[in-house]
């Protein structure tokens, strides 16, 4: 289908320009006239279209703050009585991210051509999640698009805040491990060989710890490329395995069994499950469709499979609480609260309460984990450095005895 470049004026007299597909100029003219445009020029796009922007888009990241602001601005403009097309045009002028601007421009063109807003954003799955698309679809069906957009903004903000807290908890331990590892590698590859050469020339026999470190030093210096290649290969193999369904399941199951860390991961997954499901249900998304979406965004394969069993059970007429109880992956109090919510017809409200509780609990768990990780890593790094220092001191004592003789 040919692509045409059109220029026209809208009902306010403002000049607009864009690309649109049509079988002929006449068909495009009718589409633009039906949209209320006064056509000034139409030309067919000639030659192949080289999409260099698409290549750049693969390396462009869109911040969650940008999506939150889009939700808030669209909600405010639509609630003020502006049409969706006018709101999108206004939004395009305010967006600074060039990739996101092109996405919203494409969404605007699709809506102009008669597409629904939900179908238009569904074409950009890298930017808009299934959660976003389905909530927009529910908002369109119920006529509460502005309310749904505000809910999406609050949900995205809460989820981003939770992710930030978890990342912040691991920043200091990661820095400690990186710096400590660099110090250890420096001592093994540069400091140790100098001392070993002195001890060897003096005829001092090397103790076992020193011989072990010497062997490690030789491997790191002579076979550094091989060590790096093996390390990268193992990392790639592990990452590839974890991407498989069975690999991800086994890895996530292992993570859930780690003391303290596993409990935190479980709380995060349950909080995301309850908050997402509550947001979807309160926005009018059918329960089966909502469970299908939550299954994909919960972030843990073990919990995801539990939610799939819930989906299958609900499709057969069961309550949500029953499959959760059978799985033994959810705490008893959480299951009981969900059961009460189902019985009273206030499931979304109860899910929000559960999520609020877990988010508070997550804050305490993060503080406790941070307080635990710092001394643990300090002890580990101290033991490693102490082993290296003792490996240097033991032959040094023998050297001093030899000199005294």
Image (spheres, grey):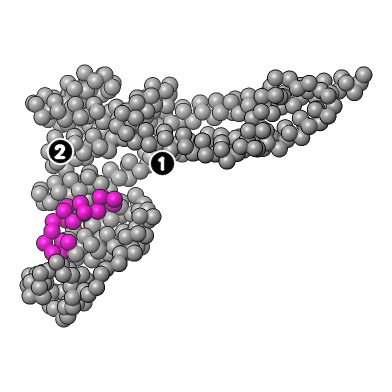
Report the span colored magenta: 110-128
Residue 372 part of the magenta segment: no
For the N terminus, the image quarter is bottom left
Depth check, front residue: 274 or 103 = 103
Number of residues whose C-alpha sits closer than 10 Å to that of mark 2, classed few (under 14), some (14–19) or many (20 or more): few
Mark 2 lies on residue = 289
Residues under labels 1 and 2: Cα distance? 29 Å
Do the residues under discs 1 and 2 have CB atoms within 8 angstroms?
no
**x and y percent of residue 308 in the render?**
20, 30
Mark 1 lies on residue = 164
Q: Can the viewer see residue 63?
A: yes
Q: Residue at x 32, y 45 (%)?
A: 157
Q: Secondary structure at mark 1?
A: helix
Depth check, front residue: 135 or 79 = 135
For the C terminus, the image quarter is top right
**x and y percent of residue 68 in the render?**
30, 51
Q: Secondary structure at mark 2?
A: helix
Q: Can the viewer see residue 13?
A: no
Q: Quadrant of residue 303?
A: top left
Q: Is residue 211 left or right of residue 95?
A: right
Q: Residue at x 18, y 49 (%)?
A: 136
Of the numbered discs 1 and 2, the one sitting upstream in the chain is 1
């Amino acid at each position: 289908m040919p692509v045409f470049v059109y220029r026209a004026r809208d009902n306010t007299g403002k000049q607009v320009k864009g690309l649109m597909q049509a079988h002929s100029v006449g068909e495009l003219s009718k589409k633009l006239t039906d949209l209320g445009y006064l056509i000034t020029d139409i030309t067919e796009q000639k030659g192949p279209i080289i999409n260099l922007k698409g290549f750049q888009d693969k390396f462009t990241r869109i911040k969650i703050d940008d999506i939150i602001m889009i939700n808030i601005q669209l909600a405010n403009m639509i609630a003020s009585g502006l049409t969706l097309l006018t709101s999108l045009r206004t939004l395009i002028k305010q967006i600074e991210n060039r990739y996101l601007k092109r996405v919203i421009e494409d969404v605007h063109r699709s809506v102009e051509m008669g597409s629904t807003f939900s179908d238009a954003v569904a074409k950009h799955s890298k930017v808009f999640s299934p959660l976003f698309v389905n909530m927009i679809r529910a908002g369109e069906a119920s006529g509460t698009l502005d309310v749904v957009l505000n809910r999406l903004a609050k949900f995205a903000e809460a989820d981003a805040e939770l992710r930030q807290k978890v990342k912040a908890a691991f920043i200091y331990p990661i820095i400690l491990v990186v710096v400590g590892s660099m110090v250890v590698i420096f001592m093994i590859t540069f400091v140790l060989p100098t001392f070993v050469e002195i001890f060897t020339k003096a005829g001092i026999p090397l103790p076992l710890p020193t011989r072990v470190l010497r062997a490690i030093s030789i491997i790191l210096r002579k076979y550094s490329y091989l060590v790096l290649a093996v390390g990268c290969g193992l990392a790639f193999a592990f990452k590839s395995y974890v991407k498989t369904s069975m690999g991800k399941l086994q890895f996530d199951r292992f993570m859930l069994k780690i003391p303290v860390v596993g409990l935190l991961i479980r709380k995060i997954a349950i909080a995301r499950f309850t908050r997402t499901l509550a947001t979807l249900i309160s926005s009018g998304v059918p329960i089966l469709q909502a469970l299908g979406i939550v299954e994909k965004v919960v972030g843990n394969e073990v919990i995801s499979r539990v939610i799939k069993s819930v989906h299958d059970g609900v499709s057969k007429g069961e309550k949500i609480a029953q499959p959760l109880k059978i799985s033994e992956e959810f705490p008893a109090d959480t299951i009981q609260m969900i059961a009460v919510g189902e019985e009273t017809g206030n499931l979304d409200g109860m899910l929000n309460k559960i999520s609020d509780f877990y988010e508070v609990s997550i804050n305490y768990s993060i503080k406790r984990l941070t307080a635990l990780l710092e001394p643990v890593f300090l002890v580990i790094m101290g033991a490693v450095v102490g082993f290296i220092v003792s490996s240097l001191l033991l032959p040094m004592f023998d050297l001093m005895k030899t000199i005294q003789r």
